[in-house]
Amino acid sequence: MTRIAIVGVAGRMGRTLVNAAEQDADATLAAGIVPPGSSLAGADIGELAGLGSKGVTAVDSLAACADDFDVLIDFTTPEVTLENLAFCAEHGKSIVIGTTGLSDDEIATLDGYRERVPMVFAPNMSVGVNLTLKLLETAARALGDEGYDIEVIESHHRHKVDAPSGTALKMGETMAGALGRDLKEHGVFERVGQCGPRSDKEIGFATVRAGDIVGEHTVMFATEGERIEITHKASSRMTFAKGAVRAARWLTGKPSGRYGMDDVLDLNE
Ligand SMILES: NC(=O)C1=CN([C@@H]2O[C@H](COP(=O)(O)OP(=O)(O)OC[C@H]3O[C@@H](n4cnc5c(N)ncnc54)[C@H](OP(=O)(O)O)[C@@H]3O)[C@@H](O)[C@H]2O)C=CC1
Ligand SMILES: O=C(O)C1=N[C@H](C(=O)O)C[C@H](O)C1
């Protein structure tokens, strides 16, 4: 049985993760963490998630529940995630990280823990998106150097703070990698005013923020006379939360290392 702690337990993903962990027969909901000084400390995490009392009260520091869990699931902010990673390294814990919007420097810091912490780090934990990444790799290889323009369009709810989404960036990186291109050089994240025609090799990104959209990603491969679109639409956060709980179980007994959802889902040949 994997003992799971959920940090950011009162957030959109935190509350969904409580539901997902509760439904998983091989996981135990061991702890929930709210920000330091939060008025929600002491609340039952089942109540926070709308499930009724589960007998686990939220605490406002990891130190307060260090003995209670094996794997931390973290969907918070880049700064908080890096603090929590340091805690996991110090206390021999594993961690599943869903947080997006990390800068290059923050990713380098995260990567520095790969020898000390078993971690799954993925911008999207759904089975569908991770399969889509494989489809995109194949499509990019077949079309990207054959005159097809590649554009990524993502839509999310009005509360999302980072753009483009971590998933859109991962899609771009995956396709750029398949084509031997560097996304830093060929990614185009803004077009405004007299920006000129697109170049052949650029990979464009467009962002929509509106209402309660859970998460939608379309990749367009367009040329003279035809267009292929590969779309993934999430209609419930449960798809991400179930993936995260699955990742937490998968980490049990794994050596230190930085893993992705492709490892968890065994999508690599
Ligand atoms: N990988 C994936 O599959 C997915 C990734 N995400 C990513 O997950 C992240 C969170 O998204 P979402 O749940 O929508 O955001 P929310 O803002 O709803 O949740 C984040 C939670 O973290 C809490 N928090 C902040 N600091 C601390 C702290 N020091 N200790 C404990 N809790 C803290 C916040 O509390 P407060 O509000 O009081 O500050 C908030 O409740 C984003 O980066 C998002 O992109 C989202 C969905 C899927
Ligand atoms: O913030 C969100 O909500 C989501 N964030 C992730 C991302 O940035 O890719 C994954 C998902 O699309 C929802």
Image (cartoon, helix red, strand yellow):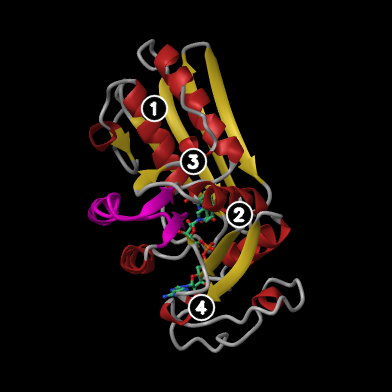
* Secondary element type, mark 4: loop
In the rendered structure, which amino acid carries the disc numbered 3? Met
Please name the residue that numbered disc 4 is placed on. Answer: 34
In the rendered structure, which amino acid carries the disc numbered 4? Val
Q: Is residue 206 above or below residue 231?
A: below
Does the magenta segment cover residue 111? Answer: yes
Q: Residue 260 carries which label?
A: none
Q: Looking at the image, is mark 2 or mark 3 earlier in the sequence?
A: 2
Marks 3 & 1, CB-CB < 8 Å contact: no
Cα–Cα gap, marks 3 and 4: 26 Å
The residue sitting at 48% across, 49% down in the picture is 251
Is the CB of mark 4 within 8 Å of ligand 1? yes
Does the magenta segment cover residue 163? Answer: no
Pick out the residue farthest to the right: 52
Q: Looking at the image, is mark 3 or mark 4 earlier in the sequence?
A: 4
The residue sitting at 53% across, 48% down in the picture is 247
The residue sitting at 40% across, 16% down in the picture is 141
Segment colored magenta: 93-121
Please name the residue that numbered disc 3 is placed on. Answer: 261
Hey, which quadrant is residue 195 in on the image?
top left
The residue sitting at 47% across, 46% down in the picture is 207
